[in-house]
Amino acid sequence: MRRTAVTRTIAKLAVATAAAGSLLATTGAAHATTQQERSAAPSHAAQQAAAQVCTVNDNGVNFRGGPGENFPVLGKVNAGQKLNARGQQGNWIMGDLWGGRTGVWIHVAYLNC
C-alpha cells in the first residue's frame, strides 16, 4: 500500500512539473514575442534619424511661431541652416533648427527638403 501512495505522489509531481514547464514555455514564448515587437519598433534615435532634413536656401529667412505671416517672427536664419522637419500645414514646414530653436515654422519657398 505504501508503494501505491508513493507512486501516486510521483505521478502528481510529474503532472505538476509538466504543467509548470508548459507555463514557462508559454510565458517564454510571450516574452519572446514582446522582445521581437520591441526590436521591430524603431527606437527614438532611429525615428529622429529618419526625420526629413531641410536646408534653408536664402539669407535672412524668418522663422515664425506658427504657420503663417500673421504669427510672430522668432528669429532669422541664413542659407545652409538645417531643419529637422516634423510637420507641414499648407505651405509652411514646422521643425527643429539644428543647434537652435525647436517647433519653428518656415515657408516652403525658403527650404530645400
Image (tube, rainbow, N blue to C red):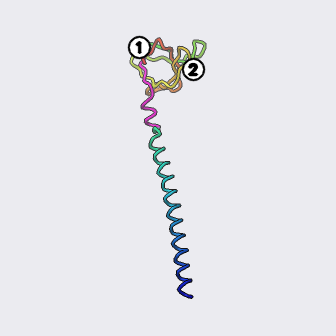
**Location of residue 21 with respect to 105 vertically, above or below:** below
Report the amino acid beneath label 2: Gly
**Location of residue 94 with respect to 7 vertically, above or below:** above
Asked if marks 2 and 1 touch (Cβ < 8 Å), the reply is no
Start-end of magenta stretch: 44-57
Q: Nearer the viewer, residue 53 or 65?
A: 53
Q: Position of residue 49 (x, y in %)?
A: 42, 31
**Location of residue 12 with respect to 32 vertically, above or below:** below
Q: Position of residue 99 (x, y in %)?
A: 44, 28
Q: Nearer the viewer, residue 101 or 45?
A: 45
Q: Position of residue 30 (x, y in %)?
A: 51, 52
Element under label 2? Answer: loop
**Residue at 45 percent of width and 17 percent of height:** 77
Which residue does the numbered mark 2 point to in the structure image? 65
Which residue does the numbered mark 1 point to in the structure image? 57
Label 1 crowd (10 A; few <14 / some 14-19 / many >=20)? some
**Residue at 45 percent of width and 23 percent of height:** 83
**Residue at 57 percent of width and 88 percent of height:** 1
